[in-house]
């Protein structure tokens, strides 16, 4: 029973850390994604990943003690172990292993598990010592020391080279896999190389947000709890396979592309340069596919990366 509760707490910890991360981008939180972003708050990101689980089990242990559930505090440090094991498994199942700096994850995970065990053995397991001691000024001193170190470390620039290499490796792998599976459909339905590069960009982005496991789960609950299916996440009223999903998505892109291309070409006589016309074309096609502003911006940024890696000849192509 205790182990089951600890597993549930590990799931709760996973959801809590993710929720804090999603609502902490203004503080510099870096989430796992396709884009290279400089870590502007390394201390915050390290503290959240390294100390977040420790704070979580400490608070939960205090609550258990307060409501008389002392037995569930026994070996509560194992929640951290379950959390990191589950997080690694989740990322592998979601097909994101190439995006992860595994050496850093192992070091952070092992350190956090060790700290959790140490805090449990020295403080948490002893009910009387769990609450802070306000009889001396030592606690306050260490709080000030911790805040000072946090502030200093948050100004450290950790660079982006490692992250860029991992993300490029992931994109190259996914581009190769998706091209083998769906390249013929993309080439058949999209009229030129620029539109095909945009089609591959949307395919990569959609399949990242809905990796194969999520797509399998969507098929199980379709159409009760979902209306979109497959790698291209097209909305459909009937069950379709992956090829049909990509075909439907490519047809939507082709229709939008031809319409926007004609509109853009009409502006060639205006005071719009080739770069602006291409920027406008990509954004409008992305917006036709999904109206969300964040989606449009991400597809536009990802398209630049995809062109640079796989379609260098398009850098000089104008519309």
Image: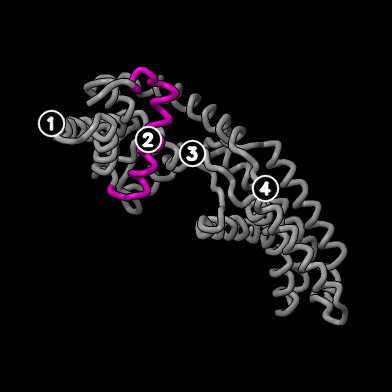
Say whether residue 297 is magenta.
yes
What residue sits right under mark 4 in the picture? 156
Of the two numbered discs 1 and 2 on the same chain, state the one appearing first in sequence: 2
Question: Is disc 4 surrounded by few (<14), some (14 to 19) or many (20+) residues within 10 Å?
Answer: few
Of the two numbered discs 4 and 3 on the same chain, state the one appearing first in sequence: 3
Q: Nearer the viewer, residue 107 or 251?
A: 107
Q: Nearer the viewer, mark 3 or mark 2?
A: 3
Q: SS for tag 3?
A: loop
The C terminus is located in which quarter?
A: top left
The N terminus is located in which quarter?
A: bottom right
CB atoms of marks 3 and 2 within 8 Å: no
Q: SS for tag 1?
A: loop
What residue sits right under mark 1 in the picture? 269
In three-dimensional space, the C-alpha distance between marks 1 and 4, rounded to whole angstroms, equals: 49 Å
Q: SS for tag 2?
A: loop
In three-dimensional space, the C-alpha distance between marks 3 and 2, rounded to whole angstroms, equals: 20 Å
Give the residues in magenta.
291-315
What residue sits right under mark 3 in the picture? 35
Q: Residue furthest front?
A: 271
Q: Nearer the viewer, mark 2 or mark 4?
A: 4
């Amino acid at each position: 029973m205790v182990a089951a509760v600890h597993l549930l707490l590990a799931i709760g910890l996973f959801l809590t850390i993710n929720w804090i991360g999603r609502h902490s981008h203004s503080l510099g939180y870096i989430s796992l994604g396709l884009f290279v972003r400089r870590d502007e708050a390394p201390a915050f990101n390290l503290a959240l990943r390294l100390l977040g689980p420790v704070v979580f089990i400490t608070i939960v242990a205090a609550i258990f003690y307060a409501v008389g559930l002392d037995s569930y505090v026994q070996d509560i440090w194992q929640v951290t172990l379950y959390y990191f094991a589950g997080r690694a498994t989740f990322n592998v199942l979601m097909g994101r292993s190439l995006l992860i700096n595994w050496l850093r994850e192992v070091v952070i995970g092992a350190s956090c598990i060790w700290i959790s065990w140490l805090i449990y053995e020295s403080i948490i397991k002893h009910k009387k010592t769990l609450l802070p001691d306000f009889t001396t000024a030592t606690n306050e001193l260490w709080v000030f020391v911790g805040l000072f170190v946090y502030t200093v470390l948050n100004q450290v620039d950790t660079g982006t080279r490692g992250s860029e290499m991992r993300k490029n490796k992931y994109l190259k792998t996914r581009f190769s896999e998706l091209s083998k599976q769906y390249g013929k459909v993309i080439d058949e339905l999209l009229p030129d190389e620029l539109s095909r590069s945009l089609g591959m960009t949307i395919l990569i982005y959609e399949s990242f947000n809905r990796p194969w496991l999520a797509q399998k789960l969507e098929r199980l609950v379709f159409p009760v709890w979902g209306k979109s299916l497959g790698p291209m996440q097209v909305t459909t009223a009937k069950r379709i396979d992956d090829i049909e999903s990509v075909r439907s998505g490519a047809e939507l892109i082709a229709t939008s592309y031809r319409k926007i291309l004609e509109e853009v070409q009409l502006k060639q006589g205006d005071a719009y340069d080739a770069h602006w016309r291409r920027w406008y074309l990509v954004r409008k096609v992305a917006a036709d596919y999904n109206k969300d502003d964040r989606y449009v911006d991400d597809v536009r940024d990802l398209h630049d990366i995809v062109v640079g890696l796989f379609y260098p000849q398009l850098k000089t192509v104008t519309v």
